[in-house]
Amino acid sequence: MAMKIRLARGGSKKRPFYSIVATDSRMPRDGRFLEKLGIYNPLLAKDSEDRIRMNVERIQYWLGQGAQPTDRIARMLEAAGIQEKTVRNNPKAAVPGKRMAELAKKKAARAAETAAE
């Protein structure tokens, strides 16, 4: 069974509130879970203590059992010092798309023309 530690959304429309849960990866996002491990309230200020509350012992237990945290949960665990920080790199994010590459070539050609004159 592939275990995940992830967020389950609660709260009303435009007022999100998340539970940090340990669940089988095949279950729906807000569906059945095995254990509630904490809460995350994104509406609170970033420096607020109540924004993220986690049961660290149980999270470490599930990580020891082979549960994989999602990207967002991994970032929260890194900030709390539970998990080592991993290097993230998305080299394609800095590469311009086709249209912008064409515009850049045209601009460089015009700049070369004016410099040659």
Image: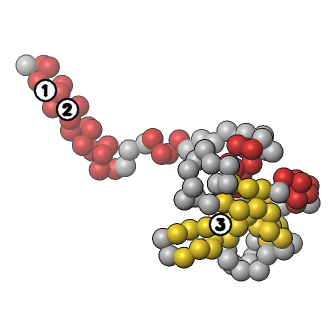
Regarding mark 2 in the picture, which secondary structure is present there?
helix
Amino acid type indicated by mark 3: Tyr
- Tag 2 and tag 1, C-beta contact below 8 Å: yes
Residue position for label 1: 113
83 on left or right of 73: right
Q: Amino acid at mark 1?
A: Glu
Residue 18 got which mark? Answer: 3
Residue drawn at (70%, 67%), measured in percent from left and top? 19
Residue 33 x, y percent position in the rendering: 79, 75
Name the spot of residue 24 as percent of width and height, x first: 80, 73
The Cα atoms of the two marked residues, 2 and 1, are separated by 6 Å
The quarter of the image holding the C terminus is top left
Asked where in the image residue 115 lies, by quadrant, the reply is: top left
Q: Nearer the viewer, residue 115 or 82?
A: 82
SS at mark 1 in the image? helix
Q: Nearer the viewer, mark 1 or mark 3?
A: 3
**Rendering quarter of residue 107:** top left
The answer to which of 16 and 112 lies nearer the viewer is 16
Note whether 7 is above or below 113 in the view shown. below
The kind of residue tagged 2 is: Ala
**Mark 3 → mark 2, Cα distance in angstroms:** 52 Å
Percent position (x, y) of residue 4? 78, 65
